Image (tube, rainbow, N blue to C red):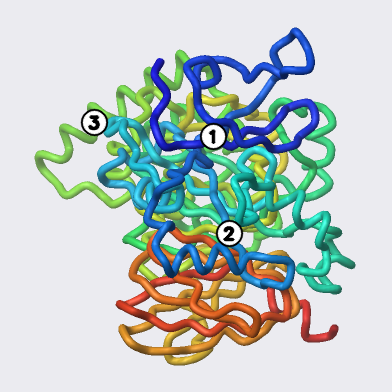
């Protein structure tokens, strides 16, 4: 395997967790890097997201000036970020994630048929961001924050220690993600202790998705009146059984306290059905709907079931979709998901923010590990449509999306060409992402930090940032939820 020219790999020693910059050779592209001080290969993780051109567009005079300014007094720091090539991601040519990665890393993806699913910005160990120090080397953002906790702000350090409490992402979704939920803190700690190879950390994972394109998702259980309708869908009834169907139909408006236990019993029965039984029922559903589509307009949920069946044949998730709200977000709309709520993203592209965690409990629409018993026992079984956020205007160019979680918020900014505006100083850290356009960011210690599509910058607490656009500039900011600072 010939190494690419003009590139360096940033690698992490799996034993010491220290970072090393290694020029690619035939040996270390295809094999572990060998430690010269011993006769055994050293285990290294090579992060594809941190491959960068030494002679890239960042060598322009403005960009070089920005890099030379990097120092201990600077409050803005460029990040090189990580991608995930999950199966459900959009192929390179259609993926915002791929475009952002190409610009952020300075290297064009060369595998057109590879899915580009997620672009990660933060400190989680399964997808860390790297902070350039202006030399040939770099350090993880996480390790740099541990050494410089003051950049997080007093309140954040007091509450979460020397780490970012949020993880910032971009998602490019071509086909449905798994039917899943994220555990609360107590369950997360238990799962991590029992199965650390599956549940990678002990934190909860509330999250928010902000649509960049039209975006579809399944989220939360449908209202009870709709449940009474779908329980009579022949294939649903076959999987859950006559007794469970009757239990649902016999509940009256005066029996509200009975709904949750009945719904839990029905949903658990459905998700626990044998693979053989599910295969037969999904085949029946597909055949019936294809026939009926010749004589009537299928419902929205029936059309969705056929789409999901094409992506995940013979999967119980096709049937379980009938139990969940089908949400369609327009660009600029957002939804948030608390702990223990079932959901699945279906298609589209979004900005996502969450507590720093990668814990997912799955039970359908996935080839990955399924934990049906845990999922069905952890859900809240609350019913009703989720709240849709439209953002609160902060100024003529910025909207803020505030979920009911302490760890994060998102600002969305569209700045017309030639305009200047300021992000006011906040007592916590921020990460800025440019998704389109070109401009400059300035602070009281840095002037003219040039930014274009794919640039990601960490901003220290208590930093006012002036933004000037050279062309219409689209950028997003993730930060700690500003509500926690009101009583500080």
60 or 77: nearer the viewer: 60
Q: Position of residue 313 (x, y in %)?
A: 35, 24
The earlier-in-sequence mark between 2 and 1 is 1
Camera-nearest label, 2 or 1: 1
Give left or right: position of 52 versus 445.
left
The residues tagged by marks 2 and 1 sit, at their Cα atoms, a distance apart of: 27 Å
Give left or right: position of 470 versus 315.
left
Q: Which mark is on residue 288?
A: 3
Camera-nearest label, 1 or 3: 1
Q: Position of residue 347 (x, y in %)?
A: 36, 48
Label 2: which residue? 353
The earlier-in-sequence mark between 1 and 3 is 1
**Residue occupying image coordinates x 60% and y 74%:** 402
> Can see residue 432?
yes
Give left or right: position of 54 versus 380.
left
Secondary structure state at the residue bearing disc 1:
strand
Q: Which mark is on residue 9?
A: 1
Q: In the image as oriented, which residue stretches furthest toward the top?
A: 39
419 or 21: nearer the viewer: 21
Report if the CB atoms under discs 3 and 2 are less than 8 Å apart. no
Mark 1 surroundings: few (<14), some (14-19) or many (≥20) residues within 10 A: many
Q: Position of residue 315 (x, y in %)?
A: 43, 26
**Residue occupying image coordinates x 10% and y 39%:** 294
Camera-nearest label, 3 or 2: 2
**Residue occupying image coordinates x 33% and y 47%:** 95
């Amino acid at each position: 395997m010939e190494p690419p020219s003009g590139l360096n790999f940033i690698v992490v020693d799996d034993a010491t967790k220290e970072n090393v910059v290694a020029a690619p050779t035939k040996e270390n592209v295809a094999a572990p890097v060998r430690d010269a001080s011993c006769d055994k290969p050293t285990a290294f993780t090579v992060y594809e997201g941190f491959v960068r051109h030494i002679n890239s567009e960042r060598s322009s005079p403005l960009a070089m000036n920005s890099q030379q300014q990097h120092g201990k007094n600077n409050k803005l720091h460029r990040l090189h970020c990580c991608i995930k090539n999950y199966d459900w991601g959009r192929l390179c040519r259609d993926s915002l994630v791929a475009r952002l990665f190409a610009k952020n890393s300075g290297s064009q993806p060369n595998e057109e048929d590879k899915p580009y699913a997620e672009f990660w910005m933060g400190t989680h160990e399964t997808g860390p961001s790297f902070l350039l120090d202006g030399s040939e080397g770099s350090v993880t953002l996480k390790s740099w924050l541990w050494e410089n906790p003051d950049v997080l702000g007093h309140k954040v350090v007091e509450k979460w220690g020397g780490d970012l409490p949020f993880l910032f992402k971009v998602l490019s979704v071509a086909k449905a993600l798994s039917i899943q939920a994220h555990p609360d803190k107590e369950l997360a700690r238990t799962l991590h202790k029992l199965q650390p190879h599956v549940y990678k950390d002990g934190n909860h994972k509330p999250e928010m998705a902000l649509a960049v394109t039209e975006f579809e998702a399944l989220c939360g259980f449908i209202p009870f009146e709709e449940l009474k309708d779908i329980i009579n869908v022949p294939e649903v009834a076959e999987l859950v059984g006559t007794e469970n169907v009757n239990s649902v139909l016999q509940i009256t408006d005066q029996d509200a306290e009975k709904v949750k236990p009945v719904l839990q019993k029905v949903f658990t029965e459905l998700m626990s059905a044998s693979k053989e039984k599910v295969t037969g029922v999904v085949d029946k559903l597909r055949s019936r709907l294809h026939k009926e589509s010749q004589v009537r307009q299928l419902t929205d949920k029936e059309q969705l079931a056929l789409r999901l069946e094409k992506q995940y044949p013979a999967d119980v998730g096709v049937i379980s979709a009938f139990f969940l709200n089908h949400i369609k977000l327009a660009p600029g709309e957002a939804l948030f998901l608390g702990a223990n709520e079932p959901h699945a993203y279906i298609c589209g592209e979004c900005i996502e923010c969450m507590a720093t965690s990668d814990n997912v409990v799955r039970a359908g629409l996935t080839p990955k590990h399924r934990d049906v018993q845990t999922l069905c026992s952890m859900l809240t079984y609350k019913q009703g449509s989720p709240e849709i956020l439209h953002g609160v205007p902060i100024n003529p160019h910025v909207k803020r999306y505030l979920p009911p979680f302490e760890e994060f918020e998102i600002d969305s900014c569209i700045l017309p060409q030639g305009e200047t505006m300021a992000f006011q100083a906040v007592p916590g850290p921020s990460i800025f992402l440019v998704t389109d356009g070109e401009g400059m960011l300035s602070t009281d210690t840095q002037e003219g930090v040039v930014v274009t599509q794919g640039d990601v910058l960490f901003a220290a607490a208590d930093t006012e940032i002036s933004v000037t656009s050279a062309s219409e500039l689209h950028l997003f900011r993730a930060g700690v939820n500003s509500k926690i600072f009101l009583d500080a």
